[in-house]
Image: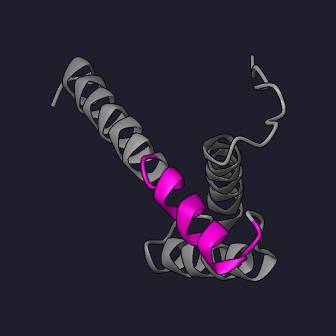
Amino acid sequence: MTLEEVRAEITRLDEDIIRLIARRQSYAKKVAELKQASGIPVHNSQRKNDVLAYVMTEAQAEHIDPAPVKEIFEILISMNEKAQRAALGEKVPPKRIVR
């Protein structure tokens, strides 16, 4: 495989990751509605901890450093909570631009 072919495959994987993030985010409105109906707050520390523990275990099983995986999922959870708040009409903090 050439460098260009490897880079093209990485680009395809990046596109898949973006689509999966979008798919994950698409559930925010439904989660917000279900939480609201059940009187559950948007932020659920126990659920967050459970998700982080799970993904760190999965990362270890795949021989991936769990620390950056935890950081990635903290960001994904934060994105989802913001989308849930927006779906409920709550004030959402401005988006932070990372450079």
Q: In which quadrant will I find the N terminus?
A: top left
Q: Nearer the viewer, residue 99 or 89?
A: 89
| 16 relative position to 84: left or right | left
| 66 relative position to 63: left or right | right
* Residue ID at (61%, 51%): 80
Residue 9: x, y in percent? Answer: 23, 32
Residue 67: x, y in percent? Answer: 71, 63
Report the label total: 0
Q: Residue furthest left?
A: 1
| 1 relative position to 99: left or right | left
Overall secondary structure of the magenta section:
helix
What is the magenta range?
Answer: 26-41
Where 2 sits versus 36, above or below? above
Q: In which quadrant will I find the C terminus?
A: top right
Residue 89 image-quadrant placement: top right
Q: Nearer the viewer, residue 52 or 7?
A: 52
